[in-house]
Structure formats: structure tokens, C-alpha cells
Image (cartoon, rainbow, N blue to C red):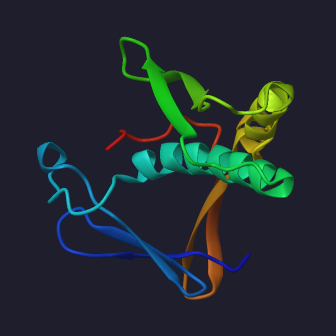
Amino acid sequence: MEDMVVTFGEKKRVDCTFGEYVVHTDQPVQGGGDGSAPAPFDLFLASLATCAGIYVLGFCQARGIATEGIKLTQRHEYDEAHKLTGVRLTIELPPGFPEKYVGAVRAAAAGCKVKKVLAAPPEVSVETVQGSATRDTAPSSSPPGPVM
């Protein structure tokens, strides 16, 4: 995958460009943004849901199973400090979905790459550079800044 390049817009807008794509983010109005796009954390959560979705879609397409009436719902659990503590994905299957594939379609969704990365997270480092000289590299084991 190509590098992702982040640029800044007005107020709280932050865009990420990679390849031919630009992902726009913003903060909600109560967070100082315009609410013109999802917040980065919302996109993170959506990446998990859509990843499970593409695995379910691929499973069904490979077996010639119609996807009409299949719906995935993702719910989030937070503690009192509003820290994400759990994610629950529910796959709603329509009447007539082949019984022999119920467990397998659940396993397909659970096999999504985003979920696997969350289960065994990579090390993320942050560095600063001026020009081409690296100034500072620090692993991300320190707590992140405020969630916006």
C-alpha cells in the first residue's frame, strides 16, 4: 500500500490521501468542527464493520448465496471514561438463508483483516522531521492525546 499523506483544512478538517483516494474527516460541531465528514475514530469503527461486511459478501458470492436481506449491525460498548471496551457485530440473516452456512458466515466475518490487526496490533511509532533529518521517534505505547 502506498504512503498515506495527511493535510489540514479549515477548523477541524483533516484529509488523508493515498493512491487515487482522499478520505475526508471532520469533528462534530460540539467538538469545534463543522460535522462535514465522519470523525477519524468513527471511520476506524466503520472500517471494522465494512471489513466484516466484505468478508460476508465474499463468502456469499463464492457460494452463489443472495445477499438481499443480509444486514450487519455493529454496536459499541464504552466504559464510564468513554473508552471503547467492546464491539459487537450482529449478522442478520434472511429467512431461507442456508442453515448449513450459518456458522461459516459468522466465521467469515470474524476473519476480517481489521479484526485480526486489532487482536494482534502492530507497533505504531511517531516521529518528527524537519527537512529530511529525523528528529525524534517514540513508540505509541504512551497514551494517545484527547479523543476528538
Left or right placement of residue 52 versus residue 107 in this view = left
- The quadrant of the rendering that contains the N terminus is bottom right
Name of the residue lying farthest toward the top: 80
The quarter of the picture where residue 148 lies is top left
Left or right placement of residue 39 versus residue 98 in this view = left
| x then y, percent, for residue 56 | 71, 45
Looking at the picture, tell me which residue is in the foreground, 115 or 141. 115
| x then y, percent, for residue 75 | 47, 26
**Up/down of 132 relative to 96, above or below:** below
| x then y, percent, for residue 37 | 28, 61
The quarter of the picture where residue 132 lies is bottom right
**Up/down of 46 relative to 83, above or below:** below
The quarter of the picture where residue 146 lies is top left
Can I make out residue 4 in this image?
yes
Q: Name the residue: 62% across, 62% down.
A: 136
Q: Name the residue: 19% across, 73% down.
A: 10
**Up/down of 7 relative to 68, above or below:** below
Q: Name the residue: 20% across, 49% down.
A: 28
Name of the residue lying farthest toward the front: 96
Count the labels in the image. 0
Can I make out residue 123 in this image?
no
Left or right placement of residue 142 versus residue 99 in this view = left
